[in-house]
Image (cartoon, helix red, strand yellow):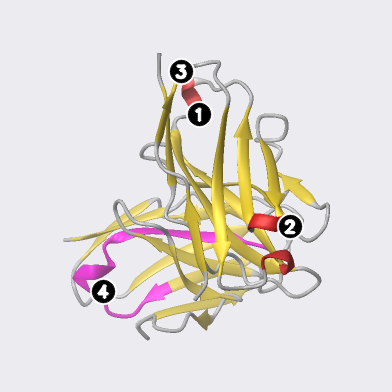
Amino acid sequence: EVQLVQSGAVVKKPGESLRISCKASGYNFATYFIGWVRQMPGRGLEWMGMIYPGGSEIRYSPSFQGQVTISADLSITTTYLQWTALEASDTAIFYCARGAIWGAPSFGFDYWGQGSLVIVSS
Amino acid sequence: DVQMTQSPSSLSASVGDRVTITCRASQDISHDLGWYQQKPGKVPERLIYTASTLQSGVPSRFSGSRSGTEFTLTISSLQPEDSAIYYCLQYKTYLWTFGQGTKVEIK
């Protein structure tokens, strides 16, 4: 069974750093892209970027390029989303989701994590 | 980047009504589009992929179609449990994009 299990809710202060995680199981982690999606309070879904854990390819939306870092650790089948200096505007739910197989036609995101709530407040 | 223009932003309809939601792509994305349903406080779920393929387990009252760069999600007979926000997602290009979402309410 494919599962994406995300880290729990966190409350941070502006300027602090943060890394949230998404642990995958039930499939070959190295062969599928994993994406990250932001949902600000009361707002829609925003595609942030995605990573191919089996290679070096990472894609970022222009809206998030330079604002966050996406990475992965193959050995523990985990993907990360990281900030070096949080702002109050980073308050949101962040979802990871499984995307395309490398080199094959894509069908969008098929499996989603449960979401990680990040609250940034002084 | 491909822009996805979704309309309407919200609608209210009665049980049994036929409901249509549209996404228009700013360029050709072939059939590389999916539709997602998100209920309050829940994780988004895929309803349709490749513009018209129904996700396993999704009720047959949901359908998708494509005409050029315009994509349509149709609920043939609206049910109370269909109250949700619906999003399109294009995955044709190197960078993917969501539509802005359509909130469907039951009268």
- The residues bearing labels 2 and 3 have C-alpha atoms spaced at a distance of 30 Å
Percent coordinates x, y for residue B76 in the rendering = 33, 80
Q: Earlier in the sequence, mark 2 or mark 3?
A: 3
Q: Nearer the viewer, residue B68 or A59?
A: A59
x, y percent for residue B97 = 62, 52
Circle on res. B78: 4
Quadrant in which the C terminus of chain A is drawn: top left
Disc 4 element: loop
Q: Quadrant of residue A63?
A: top right
Q: Are marks 4 and 2 on the same chain?
A: no
Residue under label 3, please give it.
A13
Q: Specify the subunit that label 1 lies on.
A: A
- Name the residue beneath numbered marker 2: A53
Instruction: Tell me which amino acid carries mark 2.
Output: Pro
Kindly indicate whether the residue at mark 2 contacts the one at mark 1 (C-beta within 8 angstroms).
Answer: no
> Please, what is the three-letter code of the amino acid marked with disc 4?
Leu
A105 over B26 or under it: above or below: below
Please report the bounds of the magenta region as a residue range.
B74-91
A56 left or right, relative to A113? right
Kindly give the residue lying farthest to the left in the view shown.
Answer: B107
